[in-house]
Amino acid sequence: MPAREAAFRAVVAALKERKKTVAVVEATCGGLISSSIMGVEGSSAVYYGGSVSYNTKKARKLLLDDGELHAALVAGVEPREGESEADQYIRSKHDWTARTAVAFCEAMETDYALAEGGAVGPTFAKEGLTSGFTVLCVAGRSAPGEAAKVLAQRLVRSDHAERGRNMQAFAEHAAELLCETIGADEAARPRRQLR
């Protein structure tokens, strides 16, 4: 069984076992995370759906058509003294994924929401960015009825700019983070390394 398939089987199994649900927002994996969840038999019991928001400036309707959220995401983050353009961009994706994961968890009324955003390559628009990265964020509730909040966030870096390989690896890392956050049994958790 391919690694990505096994990883998302573990995600779906953990969600089903705990009677929990998830929604997904992807910016650079192009729907690979969503399609990997949907490819698992029985995933309709736990997966509400998702969105691919490839260009934040043009994707307000894909981002819940929420004007306040969209404005915050487009604004990005203020530069810090001495910070490179690449580092500022990476930091902006921490903000983007956190805001988006929380907003989708609340709006979709799911137990969890995963947001993913970064750059996969090979054409990078930010000076100093030469290899792929993604920031993964899982939002959820600590208890029923509570407001959604960030439960886990992770920066994943690649050492290359090969788009397809990065998308695949980042999707597998998303499955790993979901399993860790949901509390999947240690034996069932996928373990991935960038290739």
Image: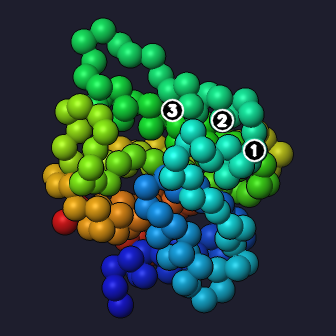
Depicted 191 relative to depicted 77: above or below: below
Label 1 neighbourhood size at 10 Å, few (<14), some (14-19), many (20+)?
few
Residue type of the residue flagged with mark 1 = Asp
16 up-or-down from 108: above or below: below
In contact (CB < 8 Å): disc 2 and disc 1: yes
Disc 1 target residue? 65
- Give the residue at the far top of this rendering: 81
Q: Residue at x 63, y 70 (%)?
A: 15
Numbered disc 1: secondary structure: loop
**What x and y, as percent, mark residue 154?**
40, 45
- Spatial separation of the CA atoms under disc 3 and disc 1: 18 Å
Q: Which residue is mark 2?
A: 70
Question: What amino acid is found at the position of numbered circle 2 in the picture?
Answer: His
Q: Earlier in the sequence, mark 2 or mark 1?
A: 1
Q: Quadrant of the C terminus?
A: bottom left
Residue 58 position within the rendered picture, expressed as x and y whole percent measured from the top left: 60, 44
Indicate the amino acid at tag 3: Asp
Q: Position of residue 82 (x, y in %)?
A: 24, 12
Q: Residue at x 19, y 43 (%)?
A: 130
Note whether residue 114 is visible: no
Contact between marks 2 and 3 (CB within 8 A): the answer is no
Give the label on residue 95, or none. 3
Pointers 3 and 1 in contact (C-beta within 8 Å): no
